[in-house]
Image (cartoon, helix red, strand yellow):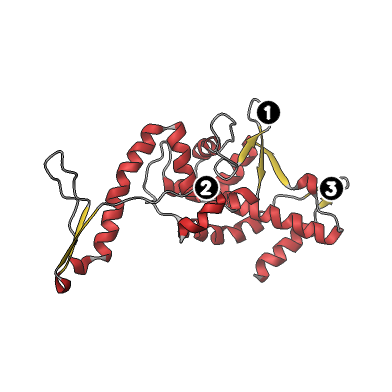
Amino acid sequence: RPEAKNLFDATLDCAVREGQYRFRYADPWDLWEELLPEYQARVSGIARRSDSLSLGSYTLGEFNRFYAAVLAVGAAHEHLCWLWGQRQSEFPIRSAVLVWNRPRWTSVLSSLSGIAEEKCRAMLSDLYFAPEHSVDLHVHPFVPLDKGRFEIALAAPFPLHSLPDENILLVCSVLRPEVFDAASLEKEKELIAKLTGELSRYSPEGPVSLPKPTPDIDLMIVDESDATIAICELKWMRKPIRSGKIPHSDA
């Protein structure tokens, strides 16, 4: 968009070279705010769960707003690095990873997302990479660079190519299993409500409780014109961790 292009150019015009492979620029608030609606729409577009879903001290809706702010900051930085490389004929390798201290991350993301700093600190902490339990940098994109977790690094390509709602549920399964278990119980209700609306012409009914040990019926639908009853067991598709399997699962 012309507005975004002008803001990228204006930010880069004021950027300062710091050595052969590093540059620095002032916080581009206008640019971040210009990019934010696009990334809010992207996060909302791929979310499969209700915004009201509790993830502990914050909801999934609040996390999505927080993550859209992360994406706006990351996208701006990644493109500014590319533009600097075009202008200078040298990609700024030493600036490719964004390193801020924890208060700055919290303050910027809180201001962009409209989420209280206390909740932003909790979400930031949940996304810290830790070798003992982290899967990869798509799930835990923030890397603490010291024991006190004061200096935090972010490589923008990882969050930009992640699935935030899937990833934060995976994080909860490790850090707060009780929250994850409660969220899992809500999935069936959400899915049945959605299917009931979309299949209303087939008289959907469910779940139907049956005497033990017979399994309950998750959903039952009727096609009168074909004299057919479908008795359904609902499954929630798992999003694979390995990137090579994701396209097949999406299909």
The image shows residue 248 at horizontal and vertical percentages of 49, 58
Q: In this view, does 215 lie above or below 145?
A: below
In three-dimensional space, the C-alpha distance between marks 1 and 3, rounded to whole angstroms, equals: 23 Å
Question: Which of the 4 image quadrants contains residue 142?
Answer: top right
Residue type, label 2: Phe
The residue wearing badge 1 is: 146
Q: Residue furthest left?
A: 211
The residue wearing badge 2 is: 66
**Looking at the rendered structure, which numbered label has been put on residue 116?**
none
Label 1 crowd (10 A; few <14 / some 14-19 / many >=20) = few
Residue type, label 1: Asp
At mark 3, the secondary structure is loop
C-beta proximity under 8 Å, tags 2 and 1: no
Q: Which residue is depicted at the point 57% across and 47% down?
A: 111
Q: In which quarter of the image is the N terminus?
A: bottom right
Q: Which of 237 and 21 is in front in this view?
A: 237
